[in-house]
Amino acid sequence: MAFTLAFHIILVPLGVSWAFMALIANYRAVKHDDKDAMLLAQRWSKYMAVTFAVGAVTGTVLSFEFGLLWPRFMGRWGEAFGVPFAFEGLFFFTEAVFISIYIFGWRRLKPWTHFWTGVPVVLAGVLGSVSVVAANAWMNSPSGFTLDSAGNIVKVDPIQVIFNDSMPLQAAHMLVAAYLVGGFLIASVYATGMLRGRTDRYHRLGFVIAFSVAAVAAPIQMGVGDQLARWVYSNQPVKFAAIELVPTTSSDVPETLLGHLNEDGTVTGGVPIPGLASWLSDPSTGKATVVQGLNTVPADERPTIPQVNIVHLSWDIMVGVGTLLFLLALWYGATWLFRRRMPQSRWFLRAAACSGVLAVVTMEAGWVVTEVGRQPWIVYEYMKVEDAATGNTGVWITFIAVVLLYLTLGVTTILVLRGMSRRFRRSGGFTDHDAPYGANAVPDADPEREEAVP
């Protein structure tokens, strides 16, 4: 499950943000008769169709894994946990329908009509992502159900299930991350092309649109992430203790960069910044803020020592690399503000070329913090992982099969996208025998029939 989620999550930012960036290019093309923007919108729509199709495959495997790998979890909590996924299914099909309309509408619809058919793709992608995150947030803050004396669900309130306490911040965090990661991923491709000498307006525009989206998302993500960390401090103190390497309850807790927790409860290595963890937890009380320690709950109700170290390292990676990306976005924004153009330095382009991979690493690290930090709970304070997972002994066989399938799928996707890119570069324009928003031109067709085509 961890492997398939880690793979699938890479496609989510593209599914959520790429349509938005294609619409930016589409709007500019129609509004300002910009041929480069039109070419970008056309090509991006085809790329996003490929990644959407691959995401549909990987997401379908995940849906089967819920039943196969977590039968006791789904058997007991499926009535509540499944509510957000029901809505996600509706949004998924809506997105699929309008992606089809948008792609095939290039030569069949008027310019602005076609543009507006792309808006539901963006909205459905956003709402579908929020629905999935709502299910995960429910696991962190379960609500909206009534249990009988045997612990079985007898009543479900769908509204409370979806809009649980964790959902607003967690959904905002993932949604902004989708635009941040998607923007950096796409911009990194154009930055690499510019480093290789492709400095024409088409590549610059592709870079500017994608990187601008990421640059706007970066400071927003810093603020949302800070609020979410404080929510964890207030509502999941044991997870927060794992994040900050706090073995015992105390105030004036340092922010330890790197380092690790030992079996005897001591922290070694790393660089401690005195009092910063307490201050960030609640600035109103500063260093006097008390942070609950790991030892305040029994050992079987908190992450193990290796899990604590994984959570803390993932937190450091997420915050550290995220801060570097924020500084890169700041560099970009400052250059636009004072010089009215994107940075020209090759060092900036090198950093931008790396930003896509770094953004994915940051996102993956964030999900490790979320999922491993909640251990040993799968439903916080209601059900433990060991009580939810399957006891089937054939899991390793299916795991190997899934790894091979996903590696094949990943390599094939990259080869397909690279092949499309090479064909687009060789063609130098739209390759479907006719112009966008123009009359259909069918090669070797009957001239009389061709004239009758609207």
Image: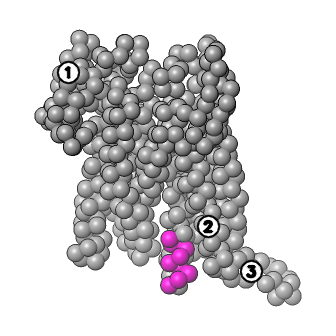
Residue that carries the numbered disc 2 in the rendered image:
118
Residue type highlighted by circle 3 = Ala
User: As rendered, which of 155 and 194 lies closer to the eye?
Assistant: 155
Residue that carries the numbered disc 3 in the rendered image:
441
Measured Cα–Cα span from mark 3 to mark 1: 71 Å
Q: Is residue 30 magenta?
A: yes
Q: Which mark is residue 267?
A: 1
Q: Residue 310: in sight, yes or no?
A: no
**Kind of element beneath mark 3:** loop
Compare marks 3 and 2 and give the one earlier in the sequence.
Answer: 2
The C terminus sits in image quarter:
bottom right
Compare marks 3 and 1 and give the one earlier in the sequence.
Answer: 1
Q: Residue 298: in sight, yes or no?
A: yes
- The structure residue drawn at horizontal position 50% and vertical position 78%, both measured from the top left corner, is 28
The mark lying in front, picked from 3 and 2, is 2
**Kind of element beneath mark 2:** helix
- Graded by Cα atoms within 10 Å as few (under 14), some (14 to 19) or many (20 or more), the crowding at tag 1 reads some
User: As rendered, which of 274 and 14 lies closer to the eye?
Assistant: 274
Instruction: Estimate the x, y position of residue 220 in percent, counting from the top left.
Output: 35, 56
- The structure residue drawn at horizontal position 82% and vertical position 88%, both measured from the top left corner, is 451
The N terminus sits in image quarter:
top right
Numbered label tally: 3
- Graded by Cα atoms within 10 Å as few (under 14), some (14 to 19) or many (20 or more), the crowding at tag 3 reads some
Measured Cα–Cα span from mark 3 to mark 2: 24 Å
Task: Magenta stretch: give its range.
Answer: 24-32
Q: Is residue 314 magenta?
A: no
Measured Cα–Cα span from mark 1 to mark 2: 52 Å
On the picture, is 171 further left or further right than 58? left
